[in-house]
Amino acid sequence: MLADLNNLMMGLGIALEPYNLLIACIGLILGIIVGVLPGLGGANGVAILIPVVVTMPATTGVILLSSIYWGALYGGSITSILFNIPGEPWSVATTFDGYPMAKKGRAGFALVLSFLSHAVGAIVGVFLLTFLAPLIAEIALKFGPAEIFSVMMLTFSAFVGLGGKSPVKTVAAILFGFALAAVGMDIVSGQLRITFGSVVLMGGFNFIVAVIGLFGLGEIFLTVEEGLKVEGIVGRVTLKDIVDGFKELLLYPKTLFMGAIIGCWMGITPGGATPASFMSYGFAKESAKNSAEFGHGASAGIIAPEAAAHGAGTSATLPMITLGIPGSPTMAVIMGGLMIFGLTPGPMLFKEHADFVWGLIASCWVGNFIGFFMVMAFAPLFAAVLKVQFSILMPAIVYVCAIGAYAVNNRMIDVYYMMIFGVLGYLFKKLDYPIAPMVLALVLGNMAEQAMRQALIMGQGSPLIFFLPPIALPIMIVALTIFFWPVIAPLKDKLLGKKKA
Amino acid sequence: MRTADISIALMFFLIGLILIFDSVRIGFQWGVTGPESGLFPFYLGLGLIICSLLTLRTIFVKYKKDGYKKLLMPEGALKSILWVLIPSTGMIVLTEFVGLHIAAGLFLGFYMRAVGKIGWVTTLLVSILVPLSLYIAFDKLFLVPLPQGLWGGMLIPF
């Protein structure tokens, strides 16, 4: 504990260097803008900037990338409340109550409430990150291939069992992601796979390109389809709003912390901010006495999803730096950035690049702190970005996406892939195939395969190695339970004689 | 909706077949040094096929119950989506010839005039200034080379 605090102080020293501080502020501003714009989200906002970041020192670069994420987390709710347009998928749940409240003339109050909940979610998330990460990294050092594979199983099972989408479709999306990752050279034997002799396919599919297509263009198609109508509410945050917001927040301590904890849980067992916000909203609604108020501007309806979204966002850092398994799609892209710097996320990172890790953790504290004041002070200013006509914004966003997709590998074919992924992303969204687990599968594909094959070699071909105590077995059991949860849950209810709710 | 749902399921089925086909070619069993390259993709393919069959079954049950009327997208949405899809694909194809920045400038101008019905002055200003500033930012400041196409290098004189 004490050693962690010392390390944190060292990290703060790095994060508070003037240059890094400046970069964090730039990242936050970019992130909030990205958060406000529909079609540009945290994941592809980060993806587009990766080529730029490569020119910086590693710590600075990662501070920039993560600051964009924090900014986007804050920014998404501004437009949800003022325009009823969720700037980010994770702020969809905020529109349910945020917009009605703003419509009643309490826009400033709604904004304050949302930012405060964000801040609390962030604090809980960062707190967990600071004190839990070193512990988990210590345990993870003992992991062999079988254990790594079982942790991945757990990760993907969480999507299937807890993701809330059709389990079969979720599995299909995951397998599709793995299949895309398998295209190209086999990292173990060097053999070419699924390329059919084509040079283009030899390079495989880069997940950053997929992220830009799936999240960026897919989202644009969805926005265009719905027909973007900007009917803004003028929101100014007054001192009274801030005081009232604080008081109101203190009335809902349970909702607030439940939201933050659900968020952190969903961030660590990958699910990401989006399902976390919906789940937390649902819980808050169920447990509230005045559930009829929900949907008409209930305070708890803003607090719960916002705290969860930010809790999930920050705590998604935890599995990424300790296990090398990102907790959300945006974290996956940030991890891609780390790997470009030659830093392999995982337990060894704590040992070999302690300064970097603690710089990152400290910048979570600093970034979320500055971000809070930034949105508090300038929310209406950022909202004004949406006043720019959509027919100007849209082509500009496509343009920026194309830059990002090309610059990853300097390959023109990636830009075409981006378009294809865009159409796929749109169809997947419409047909209820989840995108986040597919992206994660694409990112982790090679690692999962390598772990599986190494484990099989160690076990001399017997898959029983994945069920070896003491570490792999319990993880596997939990993973399988969660995986089959959609089947188990109704059975359990039947056995206990419960009626379906 | 139903057609699209079936098509995606069939696409997964096809991908599964391709995976299995290729895995069998490179070997998917236990080789001399351990599992062969095709082992992992083989099971991926198998899983995809099972998933797509399960999805297809659900589709037929579900749509028989709910009817076929539910549309994939609201009326008229296809048109506005194509208005994005076709010009942006055009931009990418054009990039092969004149480079990304010039192509993007043309795309911006086209979309703003044709869809946004924005005045000429704004259109011209935006479609020149945006690519110019991005060109300076990426190509000059951050030294991230972006595609120049066949003739792009000659078209931008600095």
Image (cartoon, coloured by chain):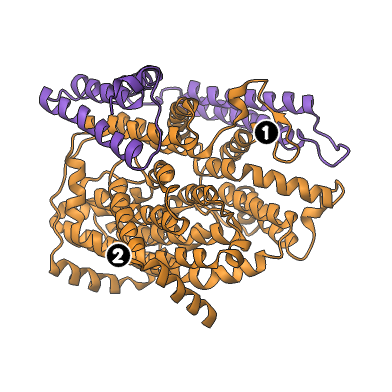
Chain colours: A orange, B purple
Q: Is residue A306 above or below residue B16?
A: below
Q: Quadrant of residue A286?
A: bottom left
Relative side of B66 to A134, left or right:
left
* Disc 2 target residue: A370
Disc 1 and disc 2 on one polypeptide chain: yes
Amino acid bearing label 1: Met
Alpha-carbon span between mark 1 and mark 2: 44 Å
Q: Amino acid at mark 2?
A: Ile
Viewer-proximal residue among A348 and A219: A348
Residue at x-position 54% and y-position 80%: A3
Label 2 crowding class (10 Å Cα cut-off): few <14, some 14-19, many 20+?
some
Q: Is residue A9 above or below residue A415?
A: below
Residue A289: image location, x then y, percent: 34, 66
- The chain containing the residue under callout 1 comes to A
Q: Write down the chain letter for disc 2.
A: A
Which residue is located at x 34 percent, y 48 percent?
A92
Q: Nearer the viewer, mark 1 or mark 2?
A: 1
